[in-house]
Image (cartoon, grey):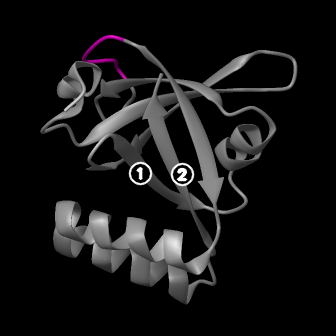
Amino acid sequence: MNNTLKQFEKQQYLNIETFRKNGQGVKTPVWFAQNGETLHIWTGISSGKVKRIRNNGSVRIAPSTASGEALGEWVNARATAHDSESKVKETEALFKKKYGVVFTILSKLNKWRGGKYASVEVIAS
């Protein structure tokens, strides 16, 4: 495994900084799952972070607390947002494995409310 990603092992959250068109950074703590060299985020398809990533895939990430306090070094990375059913299902499976019944319940509630999801793949630069 890439040494840059070692700091994300056994972490529940990462803080992802995405960038607005004017260059201003927006930091958001999120759940994530790791698959090899790729970190996966499962999020609402119409979320601000997805819109910003589609405009500019350059991001910064750091392991963090649920409130966003960085627990390690910030790392430059590339993010890509996917909304294909196969990518979303792949990320959903990774989240079910990592977060278990809590994720399953939350995802079912959100889907019941009509939520549509995207998979964000993050690869450290």
Secondary structure type for disc 2: strand
The quadrant where residue 83 appears: bottom right
Name the residue nearer the viewer: 87 or 104: 87
Distance of mark 1 from mark 2, alpha carbons? Answer: 6 Å
Specify the amino acid type for callout 2.
Answer: Val
Residue 76 position in % (x across, y down): 50, 17
Q: Earlier in the sequence, mark 1 or mark 2?
A: 1
For the point 67% across and 63% down, the residue is 45
Residue 73 position in % (x across, y down): 32, 10
Q: Please give left or right for residue 6 compared with residue 87 in the image.
A: left
Q: Quadrant of the N terminus?
A: top left
Look at the magenta stretch and give its main secondary structure.
loop
The quadrant where residue 12 appears: top left
Q: Is residue 71 magenta?
A: yes
Q: Find the magenta span and give its range.
A: 69-73
Name the residue nearer the viewer: 67 or 61: 61
Residue 97 position in % (x across, y down): 19, 68
In the picture as drawn, the residue positioned furthest to the bottom comes out as 112
Specify the amino acid type for callout 1.
Answer: His
For the point 45% across and 51% down, the residue is 41
In the picture as drawn, the residue positioned furthest to the right comes out as 22
Q: Is residue 63 magenta?
A: no
- Residue of label 2: 120
Identify whether 36 is placed above or below 90: above
